[in-house]
């Protein structure tokens, strides 16, 4: 018995050692891995943001003039391209080789069947069904639904101003995002801005902070093994809550013939085959209840923290750059004056400097600091002898690229002028990727951007912001989170304009 245990242990040790020489054996530069943990011990133990691993790696590779390199999550190899040309091949030209994100998805787990996690034909079919839901016309239709939530956001800041207290803008933005996404995706009116015990907010926090065991399984074991083992994309209680909430909403709307300007209405149109599609294609365009549940969950996960962190980072930068804040407020006020003081969809879309500020925020603080892909078909990297095998995971180092002084001089400086038409035209392709690129570009980018802009307009038209001494500077990033977010609270002083 002891001999068998020793033999298994030795075999495992040798296996890990062999696996961690994978990139060397394939002729690709690799950063020296640490036994067992690979290159990510600090990150996988929750001591450092995973996004910093790829930002630092990108910067080191650029110094070494490496167009790509390899690292390891535990003993699993990860390919990381740094050259925009290679990245364009992966994301666009040779997309058929990299059509998945490599995230867990299995038929046994309903919530994992969301658009972000699916791959191959199931993803293509669902993307085709959902694409009409995210057109600019549909966004305009939902604009009033978002605007209704700004009243609570403004009231939240107003209360702090009246009490002469600083505002934790990170918390306030997260509550606003919760109310927006539950209203838009689920058709449910919540009041997270006044009730922090809100279930959607509580479950949202749970989803974004996971254990090292979860990270180990998620990053090293294929879905076809994890699924039958009972592994779940989300905790069981969260699964139960979301599933029952969506089912109750579906049943109520269908029974009472409720129509509302939100995603749920559009999804129910697809379910019932009356979303404006050709009759001959109805069968391929319809959605099942389970698909609606999965997509509502996907919308919530995608919209819960990405938009709130972008609003937080934008206001943090504006608080420290008062000239930029003043110029943006001037544009907002002038836009409102031209529309009798009312925020309209057209007025928002006409605010060019607002667009520049949001883009600069997304450049310096991309919510998805890396873009995951997985190789679906063995692939030779163009212009090299490096071959990426089927099943190998890929990470596009977005944060590293967008903080590269070659593309963005003095990258730590917050400068919206980088996004004038002339300056954008000077930069190479694939150097601004907050929403990804190619066929798997974020389907909800219009909605996410609209949510951020609506939040900023509603606040800046009424309030001025400065940095409060309670905010820890320089800022650090949360160590365990699926999106790039500030560690700790972000306190700002607010005053009425």
Image (cartoon, rainbow, N blue to C red):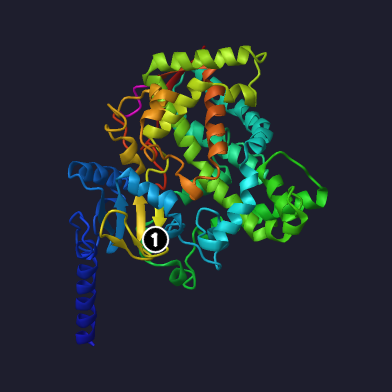
Q: Quadrant of the N terminus?
A: bottom left
- For this view, does 185 lie left or right of residue 375? right
Q: Main secondary structure of the magenta part?
A: loop
Residue 274 vs residue 230, the one in the foreground: 274
Residue at 31% x, 36% y is: 476
In magenta, the rendered stretch is 467-473
Could you classify mark 1 by the number of other residues whose Cα lies within 10 Å: few (under 14), some (14-19), or many (20 or more)?
many
Q: Tell me, yes or no, if residue 289 can be seen here.
A: yes
**Residue 17 percent coordinates (x, y):** 20, 68
* Rendered image quadrant of residue 247: bottom right
- For this view, does 126 lie left or right of residue 63? right
Task: Name the element at disc 1.
Answer: loop
Residue at 50% x, 32% y is: 173
**Residue 234 percent coordinates (x, y):** 50, 57
**Residue 381 percent coordinates (x, y):** 31, 56
Query: Is-magenta flag for residue 471?
Result: yes
Query: Is-magenta flag for residue 89?
Result: no
Residue 38 vs residue 237, the one in the foreground: 38
Residue 31 vs residue 251, the one in the foreground: 31
Q: Residue furthest front?
A: 383
**Residue 148 percent coordinates (x, y):** 66, 30
Residue at label 1? 375
Q: Residue furthest right?
A: 256
Q: Tell me, yes or no, if residue 496 can be seen here.
A: no
On screen, residue 202 above or below 328: below
* Rendered image quadrant of residue 265: top right
* Rendered image quadrant of residue 475: top left
Residue at 66% x, 15% y is: 339
């Amino acid at each position: 018995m002891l001999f068998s245990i020793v033999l298994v242990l030795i075999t495992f040790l040798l296996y890990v050692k062999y696996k961690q020489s994978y990139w060397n054996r394939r002729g690709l530069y690799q950063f020296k891995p640490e036994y067992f943990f690979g290159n990510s011990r600090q990150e996988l133990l929750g001591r450092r943001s995973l996004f910093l691993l790829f930002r630092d790696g990108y910067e080191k590779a650029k110094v070494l003039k490496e167009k790509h390199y390899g690292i390891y999550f535990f003993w699993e190899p990860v390919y990381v391209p740094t050259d925009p040309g290679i990245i364009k091949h992966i994301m666009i030209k040779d997309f058929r080789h990299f059509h998945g994100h490599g995230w867990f998805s299995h038929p046994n787990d309903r919530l994992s069947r969301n658009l972000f996690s699916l791959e191959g034909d199931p993803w293509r079919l669902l993307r085709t069904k959902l694409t009409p839901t995210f057109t600019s016309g549909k966004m305009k239709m939902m604009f009033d639904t978002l605007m209704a939530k700004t009243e609570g956001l403004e009231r939240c800041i107003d209360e702090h101003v009246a009490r002469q207290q600083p505002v934790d803008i990170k918390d306030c933005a997260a509550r606003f995002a919760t109310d927006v996404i539950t209203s838009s995706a689920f058709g449910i009116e919540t009041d997270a801005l006044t009730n922090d015990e809100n279930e959607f907010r509580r479950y949202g926090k749970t989803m974004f902070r996971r254990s090292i065991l979860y990270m180990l399984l998620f990053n090293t074991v294929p879905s076809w093994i994890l699924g039958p083992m009972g592994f779940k994309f989300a905790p069981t209680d969260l699964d139960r809550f979301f599933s029952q909430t969506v089912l109750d909403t579906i049943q109520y709307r269908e029974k009472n013939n409720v129509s509302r300007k939100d995603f749920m209405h559009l999804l129910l149109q697809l379910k019932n085959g009356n979303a404006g599609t050709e009759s001959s294609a109805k069968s391929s365009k319809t959605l099942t209840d389970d698909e609606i549940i999965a997509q509502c969950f996907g919308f919530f996960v995608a919209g819960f923290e990405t938009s709130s962190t972008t609003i937080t980072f934008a206001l943090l930068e504006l608080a420290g750059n008062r000239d930029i804040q003043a110029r943006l407020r001037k544009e907002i006020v002038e836009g409102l004056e031209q529309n009798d003081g009312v925020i309209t969809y057209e007025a928002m879309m006409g605010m060019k400097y607002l667009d520049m500020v949001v883009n600069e925020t997304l450049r310096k603080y991309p919510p998805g600091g890396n873009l995951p892909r997985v190789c679906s078909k063995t692939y030779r990297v163009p212009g090299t002898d490096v071959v990426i095998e089927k099943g190998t995971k890929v990470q596009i180092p977005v944060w590293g690229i967008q903080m590269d002084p070659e593309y963005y001089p003095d990258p730590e400086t917050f400068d919206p002028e980088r996004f004038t038409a002339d300056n954008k035209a000077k930069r190479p392709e694939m150097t601004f990727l907050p929403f990804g690129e190619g066929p798997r570009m974020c389907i909800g980018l219009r909605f996410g951007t609209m949510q951020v802009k609506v939040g900023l307009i509603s606040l800046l038209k009424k309030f001025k912001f400065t940095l409060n001494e309670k905010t820890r500077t320089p800022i650090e990033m949360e160590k365990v989170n699926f999106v790039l977010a500030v560690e700790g609270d972000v306190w700002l002083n607010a005053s009425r304009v």
